[in-house]
Amino acid sequence: MTPYSRRELLRNTGRGFGAMALASLMDPAAASAAVVNPLAPKAPHQPARAKAVIHLFMHGGVSHVDTFDPKPELAKHDGKTISAEMAKGLKTNRIDFAKAPMRGSPWKFGRHGQSGMEISELYPGIASKADEIALIRSCHGDAFDHAPGMYLRNSGSQFPGRPCLGSWVTYGLGSENQNLPAFVVMSDGAMKSGPGVYNAGFLPAVYQGTVFRSGQYPVLNLATPKGISSKAQRNSLDLIAELNQRHLDSHPDGSELEARIASYELAFRMQSSAPEAVDLTKETDATKALYGIGDPATEDFGRKCLLARRLVERGVRFIQLYSGTNIGQDWDDAHTDLQGSHTKMCKKTDQPITGLLTDLKARGLLDSTLVVWNSEFGRTPLAEGTKGRDHHPYVFSMWMAGAGIHGGQVLGSSDDFGLRPQESPFTVHDVNATILRLVGMDHLKLTYLYQSRDMRLTDVHGENEFTKQLLGA
């Protein structure tokens, strides 16, 4: 028997995902007797509340004290400085917490729904859904800059290279639709983190996010080339797959090549399924108006939200939508123009998100879909310059809806000035553990062997007590 080193053993046993996907996609019946398709549906660890996740990420840092966390004491002390004791341990690159003046919110908060949840006038549409969302006001982290904050929220680490939440969900549960990607990502521009926030990290590359474009044509080159029959295209793909497989046989650590083989096959199948899935002309004018399609301010994100609903209907497991990725033009201007940036960006997303929640509920999909609204951090309750706010990871807000979540409740709280968590502080690991739990995955059991260690999304953290509060248990 030929001895193997530990590295060779792990490398050899981990290969073949691309071939598995290829065999399954080419001949599912034959594949079932031979190999297991890594993207085939898998049983959850426990009963799932949600079949799919729509993750709405507001890139740039949304000011919690101006949107979801009212601070009347902050308004009362506008222009004053906080005490040295309160400033202890807080710092940014641009302001001195011991010297910068407090700044009250320029927007009014009102009570909404039967729950009386307080939400800013920046989000009138989302406010109308107060009884359907669970608002968390005590999230906190330790990543101060945009890219580390995005990595932390999406992968559990502020450093690049780890698998993102969508990849973990796809790895754990597979795909409900073999003709569409299991994990779809849409953004409105380049992100400061780059594509690292939606890649598969050390998981096989087949689990990475598939990017759909903005605008009228989310997926390019779906049509079969003119003059090329389906049979000829099939034969061409078979030859390419054979050549790639030969190359893969001599490079057993080629996870990217395995994913390329699988992507060719998926692209071929998408030619029959994706055009219908992304064709928004099939939607009624009333539905388009619900999402804000037709209004220049909401057109782009409205299309993304409507497409997300269509993908959920067709079995796509995880859809992540990014807003505010036009670097230097959107949320980031909160450094110098809080009112200008937040007015524009909240306007851009409020109606589309409201339309999404309304549409999902009307179609009976909200109970089986988890909708998550998130940002990398909040903004300082103190002023940066004369018109802005700096980054603030020490406490901020997020919310969830659907998937049997008990709506109309506020979980956790920040202190009187929105500086730190006061009650029930929630880390990103608590949040990610809860998201996994709602799709039926135990964050302690969802692991992948890497560098001789069973790695997981939540590392050595994450508490499921958070889930009990969200579900009203």
Image (spheres, rainbow, N blue to C red):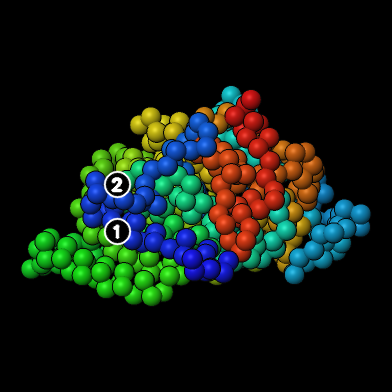
Percent position of residue 281, x then y: 23, 48
Mark toward the viewer: 2 or 1: 2
**Quick one: 145 or 302, which is closer to the camera?**
145
Give the number of callouts: 2
Percent position of residue 381, x then y: 74, 54
Q: Quadrant of residue 287?
A: top left
Q: Residue at x 52, y 64 (%)?
A: 9
Quickly name the residue at label 2: 33
> Left or right: 274 with respect to 347?
left
**Quick one: 352 or 196, which is closer to the camera?**
196
Q: Residue at x 58, y 24 (%)?
A: 114
Are circles 2 and 1 on residues that touch, CB within 8 Å?
A: no
Badge number at residue 247: none
Amino acid type of the residue that numbered disc 1 sits on in the rendered structure = Leu
Quickly name the residue at label 1: 22
Specify the quadrant that holds the C terminus. top right
Mark 2 and mark 1: span between their CA atoms?
A: 14 Å
Percent position of residue 298, x then y: 41, 52
Q: Label 2: how many residues lie within 10 Å, few (<14), some (14-19) or many (20+)? A: few
